[in-house]
Image: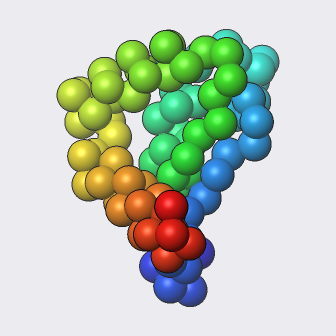
């Protein structure tokens, strides 16, 4: 979507949908964060486990399992759209 089609927007997860990546649901939240972010989700809708999400994402970046370049790409995409619409 992003490389082949040149999509310049950002991808948003479903509300509380990140943990549905694992089977059974939520059995490995850290892995769900890693898979979702590395798959290209830029904005994750985390209504309840946001503290765990923040902790896990920081740990994943520090361990190199999620690259800082991937985080920077997500931030750039979100900010680009906000600037375009005047936010």
The N terminus sits in image quarter:
bottom right
Q: In this view, does 51 lie above or below 44?
A: above
Q: Is residue 28 placed above or below 37 in the rendered structure?
A: above
- Give the residue drawn at x 49%, y 14%: 51
Q: Position of residue 40 (x, y in %)?
A: 52, 56
How many numbered tags mark residues here? Answer: 0
Residue at the spot 76% in from the left edge and 20% down from the top edge = 25
Please report the residue visible at 76 percent of the width from the left and 36 percent of the height from the top.
15
Choose between 4 and 51: the one closer to the eye: 51
Residue 29: horizontal and vertical position, in percent? 58, 19
Instruction: Examine the image and state in which quarter residue 16 appears.
Output: top right
- Rendering quarter of residue 46: top right
14 or 29: nearer the viewer: 14
- Name the side, left or right, on which 40 lies relative to 49: left
Residue 70 location (% of width, % of height): 34, 53
Q: In this view, does 16 lie above or below 11?
A: above
As displayed, is residue 2 above or below residue 47? below
Residue 19 is at least partly visible in this image: no
Colour style of the rendered protein structure:
rainbow
Image spot of residue 65 (x, y percent): 32, 36
Task: Note whether residue 27 is visible.
Answer: yes
Which residue is the extreme one toward the front?
86
Q: Residue furthest bottom?
A: 5
Specify the quadrant of the image occupied by residue 56: top left
Residue at point 55%, 19% (across, down)? 50
């Amino acid at each position: 979507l992003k490389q082949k089609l040149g999509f310049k927007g950002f991808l948003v997860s479903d509300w509380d949908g990140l943990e549905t990546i694992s089977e059974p649901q939520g059995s490995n939240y850290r892995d769900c964060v890693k898979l979702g972010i590395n798959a290209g989700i830029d904005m994750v809708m985390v209504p309840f486990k946001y503290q765990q999400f923040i902790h896990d994402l920081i740990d994943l970046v520090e361990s190199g399992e999620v690259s800082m370049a991937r985080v920077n790409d997500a931030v750039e995409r979100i900010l680009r759209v906000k600037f375009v619409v005047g936010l």
